Structure formats: structure tokens, C-alpha cells
Image (spheres, coloured by chain):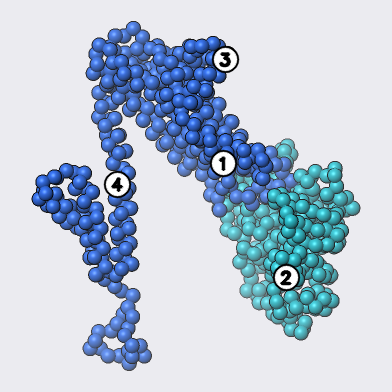
Chain colours: A cyan, B blue
């Protein structure tokens, strides 16, 4: 049965790689990668008995998970099970929703993100986020979008240094070759896939230590999806990556660790059912619910 | 397409009647023809009963035309298109009805205002010029008073809107502000004038008249308009842009200043221009606060100040020895005021077109 699931996955994978041309800038980016800034050390994120609420609604219950550095952790599960809510709690974006609250502890290399002395703005500088729909700033050019994190954080830097950061980030996002001649054009003029990679470039330009991605490929076509997945595989050398996805093939392809969220029935809080190496979750899960989900029996 | 009767094919659908997507359609001139016909019938009827007027003709033509187009279209095009034509005709007539007063007003003001226009009108004041002079003092006064009013209202209005939209969610102060802004919108302008007068009287004694008093009175009218329009514009800045900035570690105030306001810029400017156009023609509050004067005064903090609306009013009310010249100047002042308002609106449109951002 699991064999069937994994065979299906492999054929899917083969099909998509077969029909997809290799990412055009793969070699330049690979060549540039070692030159990229010295690794500041991706950080470990750990959630300890985390409960998340929207007002009275208990959205996520009792999550305990350790997210390892330099690995891609995929959060999977059906809609409304709290994956995205949990992801947003990891850089204190959850509390921006009016009425939202958090119980429990989330630590970043042992430091509690929700400690009394912690400024959420500092947390978000260390834990970057890429959103479901590409959201470049409409008033800014491609260049300004990538540099936005720097200028918005009032980092004064020389033009040449800024240029270098922008080029490095765009190369890191496999976008440089496509946009190097139109850096001064509006960022919203790019195609959907390019916009999403622009947003990734914008996020990595501020050099966070953890990268959160909320269904980054759900608005993209298969070619663009593959480009982003290649990018994720490369970025994990520098960051801790957490990715929410609805696409199980994507979780299987792109992640090292998979966490499965589920909710018993509508209105109940979502729970973390099982977490483990992706291979294991997809081939021999311990829980019945996980098995049902990954084999496509529901969800 | 149904094949011609004679050409029997062995196609399977030959068993049932073929369904065509083509149907009858009225020619392009149908609406105009019906309107002309209806007008002819209506005028014949009115002449017959001996009470022909243009207004009655228009009132009678539209329903006759609506009935005519309905039955004609129904017989040729079917009931759905017939209803569509009737509704289109009704809406077009309502639009035309609404345009009549506007066109007639513009026509009248231009016709009567142009004779009063001259170089003198724009360059001379009226100090010591019996039956003559210009409106330079009123034009200067209007621009200064309105400018100061905008300088007071725009920062207050936009900052209030920022509070209400960005910080106030769910707070009591926000609900109170919304309520009081609604109340302020309905304040009669003379009350705003009396308020400004009473306020300044406390400090300067009775009988005080200053340009800035007029600006304060106009601000009372302008602030709620600015708040309302700015709030609407800030509301449509999508939340995902704010979140994108937060996720980069941007503080909230900087997100507002660098992301939200630039994205909303075109809409904010348009709102301010329209609010300015709305208050520039106010008369009553200025009558009690800035007073009436014949010479140019461009200092809002010193002495009385004339403005176009009050100028038009007083030229008409007390025309003096050369009545017709005074009336002409009053109409010319009205025309100038309308021209200023139109310029503001055109500038607002240009700014909007130049700076609008594509918001998804």
C-alpha cells in the first residue's frame, strides 16, 4: 500500500522532471553559492507545548516539535488544521491577527521568542517569511524590492555594497539572469513565478537564520514550482527552512523532515499527529491518520 | 446552423429540430428611431390637448419610448433583451435628467460671468473704486484661507485616518472617532463659522475678524471629509503588503510610512483635492469670521480678508451706483470659483493617473 503511494510519487516526480527544462541559472547560482556570505549558522527552532488561539477559538493544540537547522521541514495536513497558523507563530506574525494569542514556548537556539524582553521586530529579522501569494511592494522597482529589507531596517550602506547584496540575493533566488536588465522596472511587472522568487530574494537579502514558507508554490505553474524547489534545496545549506505545503509530492521531493497536522473534526483544534524523516512518514508512518493522509485516502 | 430544408443530410441531429445560436436582432438605429417616434407621438398628443411645453414633452417621451422599444424588441429579440433595452433606456434617461441642472448651471454661469471678466478683475482690488475695481483681493483671500485650512486639515485628517485604520482596530477610541467624524460631517457650515468666531472671541474680544478664523471654520468642515476619504484609501491597501514588511523585520511605523502611505499616495491626494474643492466655495462661515473688505490682504493673522464667495454675495446684495457692473462682477467671481474647483479636480485626476499603484 505504501509501496503504491511511493511508486505514484516517483512517477509524478519523473514526469515533472522529464517535462521541465533545467533551471537556466542553476550553474551560475551554484558557482556563486560558495561566495555567498559566511554562514552565520542556521538556528534550531523548538516548540514546547504550543497552543494557538484566535480569540476563543482554539486553533492549534499542544505542539511539540524540534526543527533542525540546515534541513527542510515540511508541514502537511488538510486545510484548516493549523499548519499556517503554527508557521506564523514561528516568527510572531500570528499575534498580528486581532485577538490572536499564544500559549507555550517557542525557542530560537534556546532563547524564548515569546519572552518578556523580546521585541517581535527583532524575531522577524532573524526569522524571514515567504507568503503564499507573491507580494512584491507595488511602489518599488525590482531592485528596491530586494533592497527593501535593508532600507526599511535603516541599514545605511554604500551603493556598491547594496548593489552587491541585491545581485547576490537575486542570484541566490535564481532570478538574476532574468531580471538583471530590468532592475529599475516595477517588481509587479514580473510573472507570477518570478515575483515569488523576487520575494524569496527580498527575504534572503536581510540574511535571516530561519526561512518560513507558506505554500510558496501554490500560485505557480510546474516549471516555476520546480525552480523554487531547486532553490529550496540549495537554501537549506544556509538556513533552517520550514515549508507549509498542500502538495504531498512537493513535501516528498523537497523536504528532509515532515510533520503531519490533523484535526479530528471541524471546530476541534488542530494537532501535530506525527513528525519524522520524510522517507519514513511517506513509507512507514506510525499513525493510522498519517497513513490515510499520505496514501491519499482522505484530505 | 440548421441546414437548408432541401439539403437533407444524414447527420444524427436531423431527428430533432436543430438548435441555432442565432436569433433576431434590432438594427443599431432602433433606439433612436423609437425615441424620435415617441417624441412625435408625445408632441402630437400635447398639441392636441393644447398644453405643449418642452418639459412635458420630455416627461411623456420617455415612457412612450420605453413601451415602444419593449414591444418591438420582445417580438424580434425575445423578453430578456427587451427588458435589457428598457432598463438601459431608463438609466440613460435618469442620467440625462441628472445632467440637466449641471449643464444649465454651467451654461448660465459662463454666459453671465464672461462679461465681468477683464484684466482688471484679476489684478485690481476694490478699495476706493466707486462702481469699478476688481476681485484680486477676493481671489488672494480665497487661496490663502483655503490653503491655510488645508494645511490644518490634511495632517490632522490623514493622521487620524492612520490611527483609525492602522492602530485603532477594536479599540473604543476608534469607535468614538468614527461616531464623531460622522457627526462632524453633518455640521451645518454656519455652525462651524460661529464656533470659530466664538473660539477667537475668547482670546481677542468681540468683533474680531481674521483670515485664519475662516481657515479654522473651514477646517471643521474639511477634516471629516479628509478622514473619511483617507480611511477608505488606507483600507484598500492589501494586508499582505504590511505582512511582507513585518516579515522583513520592519517596525510598524516604518511599514506605514514607507509601504502603506506610498501605496495609497494617489488616493490620498485625490481625497484631499476633493475635500478642498468642497470647502473652497463656503460662504456663511467666512461671512462671520473673515468679514468683508475691499483691499488686498494676504496675511491671515492680521485683519479682515475677502474671498470669492463672500465677494459674489456682497456685490449682488449691495450693488452700489452701477448695478449691472456689480452683477457682472458677482457672476465673474462665481465663474472664477467654479474654474478653481475644476482645476483642482483635473489636477487630482492627473495625480491619480500618474501615481496610482496596481493593487491586487
Residue ID at (47%, 18%) = B289
Q: Indicate whether A288 appears above or below A276.
A: below
The answer for how far apart the CA atoms under marks 2 and 1 are is: 40 Å
Comparing A5 with A106, the one in front is A106
Residue A184, image x, y percentages: 58, 46
Q: Which residue is mark 3?
A: B202
Q: Are marks 2 and 3 in contact (CB under 8 Å)?
A: no
Q: Which residue is mark 4?
A: B96
Q: Tell me, for residue A265, which label it has, or none.
A: 2
Q: How would you rate the neighbour count of disc 3 (Cα within 10 Å): few for under 14, some for 14-19, many for 20 or more?
A: few
Q: Tell me, for residue A261, which label it has, or none.
A: none
Find the residue positioned furthest to the right.
A110
Residue B290, image x, y percentages: 46, 17
Q: Is residue B353 visible?
A: yes
Secondary structure, mark 4, is helix
On whether disc 2 and disc 3 are found on a single subunit, the reply is: no
Secondary structure, mark 2, is loop
Residue at mark 4: chain: B
Q: Nearer the viewer, mark 4 or mark 3?
A: 3
Q: Which residue is mark 1?
A: B231
Please indicate whether residue B354 sits to the left or right of residue A9 in the image.
left
The answer for how far apart the CA atoms under marks 4 and 1 are is: 32 Å
The answer for how far apart the CA atoms under marks 3 and 1 are is: 34 Å
Amino acid at each position: 500500500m505504501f509501496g503504491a503511494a511511493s511508486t505514484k510519487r516517483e512517477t509524478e516526480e519523473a514526469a515533472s522532471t522529464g517535462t521541465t527544462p533545467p533551471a537556466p541559472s542553476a550553474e551560475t547560482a551554484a558557482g556563486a553559492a560558495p561566495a555567498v556570505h559566511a554562514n552565520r549558522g542556521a538556528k534550531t527552532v523548538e516548540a514546547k507545548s504550543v497552543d494557538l488561539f484566535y480569540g476563543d477559538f482554539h486553533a492549534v493544540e499542544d505542539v511539540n516539535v524540534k526543527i533542525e537547522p540546515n534541513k527542510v521541514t515540511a508541514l502537511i495536513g488538510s486545510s484548516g488544521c493549523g499548519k499556517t497558523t503554527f508557521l506564523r507563530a514561528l516568527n510572531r506574525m500570528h499575534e498580528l491577527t486581532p485577538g490572536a494569542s499564544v500559549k507555550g514556548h517557542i525557542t530560537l537556539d534556546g532563547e524564548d521568542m515569546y519572552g518578556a524582553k523580546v521585541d517581535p521586530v527583532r524575531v522577524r529579522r532573524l526569522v524571514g517569511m515567504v507568503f503564499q501569494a507573491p507580494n512584491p511592494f507595488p511602489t518599488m522597482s525590482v531592485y528596491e524590492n530586494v533592497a527593501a529589507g535593508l532600507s526599511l531596517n535603516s541599514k545605511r550602506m554604500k551603493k556598491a555594497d547594496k548593489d552587491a547584496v541585491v545581485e547576490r540575493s537575486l542570484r541566490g533566488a535564481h532570478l538574476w539572469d532574468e531580471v538583471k536588465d530590468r532592475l529599475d522596472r516595477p517588481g509587479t511587472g514580473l510573472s507570477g513565478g518570478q515575483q515569488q522568487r523576487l520575494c524569496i530574494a527580498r527575504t534572503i537579502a536581510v540574511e535571516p537564520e530561519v526561512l518560513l514558507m507558506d505554500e510558496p508554490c501554490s500560485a505557480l505553474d510546474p516549471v516555476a514550482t520546480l525552480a523554487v524547489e531547486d532553490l529550496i534545496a540549495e537554501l537549506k545549506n544556509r538556513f533552517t527552512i520550514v515549508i507549509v505545503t498542500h502538495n504531498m509530492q512537493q513535501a516528498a521531493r523537497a523536504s528532509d523532515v515532515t510533520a503531519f497536522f490533523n484535526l479530528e473534526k471541524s471546530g476541534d483544534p488542530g494537532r501535530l499527529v506525527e513528525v519524522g524523516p520524510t522517507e519514513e512518514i511517506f513509507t512507514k508512518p506510525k499513525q493510522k491518520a498519517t497513513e490515510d493522509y499520505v496514501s491519499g485516502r482522505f484530505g | 446552423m440548421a441546414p437548408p430544408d432541401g439539403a437533407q443530410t444524414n447527420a444524427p441531429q436531423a431527428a430533432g429540430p436543430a438548435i441555432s445560436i442565432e436569433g433576431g436582432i434590432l438594427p443599431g438605429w432602433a433606439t433612436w428611431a423609437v425615441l424620435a417616434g415617441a417624441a412625435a407621438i408625445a408632441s402630437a398628443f400635447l398639441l392636441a390637448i393644447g398644453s405643449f411645453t418642452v418639459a412635458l414633452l420630455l416627461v411623456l417621451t420617455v415612457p412612450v419610448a420605453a413601451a415602444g422599444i419593449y414591444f418591438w424588441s420582445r417580438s424580434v429579440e425575445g423578453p430578456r433583451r427587451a427588458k435589457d433595452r428598457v432598463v438601459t433606456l431608463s438609466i440613460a434617461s435618469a442620467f440625462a435628467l441628472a445632467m440637466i441642472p449641471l449643464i444649465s448651471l454651467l451654461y448660465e454661469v459662463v454666459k453671465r460671468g464672461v462679461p465681468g471678466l477683464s484684466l482688471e478683475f484679476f489684478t485690481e482690488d476694490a478699495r476706493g473704486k466707486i462702481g469699478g475695481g476688481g476681485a484680486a483681493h477676493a481671489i488672494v483671500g480665497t487661496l490663502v484661507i483655503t490653503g491655510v485650512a488645508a494645511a490644518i486639515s490634511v495632517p490632522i485628517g490623514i493622521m487620524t485616518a492612520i490611527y483609525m485604520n492602522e492602530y485603532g482596530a477594536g479599540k473604543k477610541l476608534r469607535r468614538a472617532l468614527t461616531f464623531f467624524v460622522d457627526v462632524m460631517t453633518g455640521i451645518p457650515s454656519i455652525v462651524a463659522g460661529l464656533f470659530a468666531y466664538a473660539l477667537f472671541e475668547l482670546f481677542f474680544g468681540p468683533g474680531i475678524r481674521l483670515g485664519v478664523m475662516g481657515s479654522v471654520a473651514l477646517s471643521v468642515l474639511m477634516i471629516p471629509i479628509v478622514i473619511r476619504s483617507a480611511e477608505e484609501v488606507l483600507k484598500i491597501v492589501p494586508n499582505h503588503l504590511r505582512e511582507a514588511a513585518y516579515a522583513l523585520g520592519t517596525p510598524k511605523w516604518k511599514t506605514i510610512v514607507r509601504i502603506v502611505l506610498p501605496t495609497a499616495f494617489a488616493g490620498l491626494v485625490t481625497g484631499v483635492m476633493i475635500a478642498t474643492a468642497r470647502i473652497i466655495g463656503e460662504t456663511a462661515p467666512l461671512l462671520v469670521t473673515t468679514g468683508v473688505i475691499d483691499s488686498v490682504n494676504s496675511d491671515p493673522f492680521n485683519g479682515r480678508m475677502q474671498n470669492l464667495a463672500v465677494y459674489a454675495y456682497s456685490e449682488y446684495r449691495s450693488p452700489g451706483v452701477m448695478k449691472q457692473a456689480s452683477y457682472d462682477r458677482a457672476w465673474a467671481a462665481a465663474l472664477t470659483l467654479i474654474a478653481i474647483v475644476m482645476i483642482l479636480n483635473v489636477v487630482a485626476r492627473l495625480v491619480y493617473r500618474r501615481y496610482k499603484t496596481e493593487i491586487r
